[in-house]
Amino acid sequence: MKLQNKKTALVYAVDLLSKRGYSTQQLITKLKRKEYSAEEIQEAIERLINRHYLDDTDLCQRQYEAYLAEQRRSLKAIKYKLSEKGFSKEDISLAEENLDIDILDFEYNVCLRLLYSHYNLNTAEKLKCQAYLYRKGFNSSAIRLAIEDFFQK
């Protein structure tokens, strides 16, 4: 039989949140791994939400902006990554709506950036470059434009 946790679920959750932001789902998963009871987890989550220590909408928005700033992922990949972290479709859609970006321009720039960082212009093959970007989830129009510009220079 495992010894009882010394910290309460609330204290452990606050300790986790002091280091970085977690979605509600991520925090629940971490608390379950520490074998806290469902009731204690639920109570801790409610208190954290009521005291505004846990706000999925705000965290999702900040994560979305951070992924955009990295310029390493397609919008499709960003949405997938956020859903993996436990954010709801509503929070992800709201984060997307709150940012006013030109989708084609953003994806084109990221595609071009990835092409220059992963391929040598002298040895690169168009089809391989195209396939790489498709696997990353980019828009086909952005891929086509980026491939054209990459191979024209």
Image (cartoon, grey):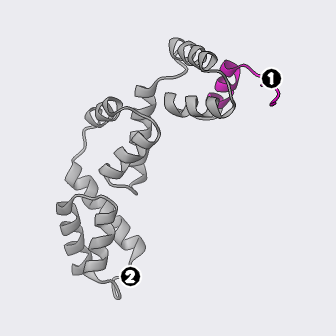
Q: Give the residue pinned by disc 2.
A: 120
Marker disc for residue 36: none
Q: Please report the bounds of the magenta region as a residue range.
A: 1-18
Residue at x 40% of width, y 57% of height: 72
Residue named by callout 1: 6
Residue 44: x %, y % from top left: 60, 17
Q: Nearer the viewer, residue 81 or 106?
A: 81
Q: Is residue 3 above or below residue 75?
A: above
Q: Locate residue 27: give its quadrant.
A: top right
Does 129 appear above or below 85? below
Q: Quadrant of residue 63?
A: top left
Helix, strand or loop at disc 2? loop
The reply to whether residue 23 is visible in this rendering is no
On the rendered structure, is 16 left or right of 54? Answer: right
Image vertical order of residue 116 relative to residue 140, above or below: below
Does the stretch in magenta take in 10?
A: yes
Residue closest to the far front: 1
Question: Which residue is rendered at x = 35% and y = 30% of the image?
Answer: 91
Mark 1 is surrounded, within 10 Å at the Cα level, by few (under 14), some (14 to 19) or many (20 or more) other residues, namely few
| View extreme (bottom): residue | 122
Q: Position of residue 98 (x, y in %)?
A: 29, 32
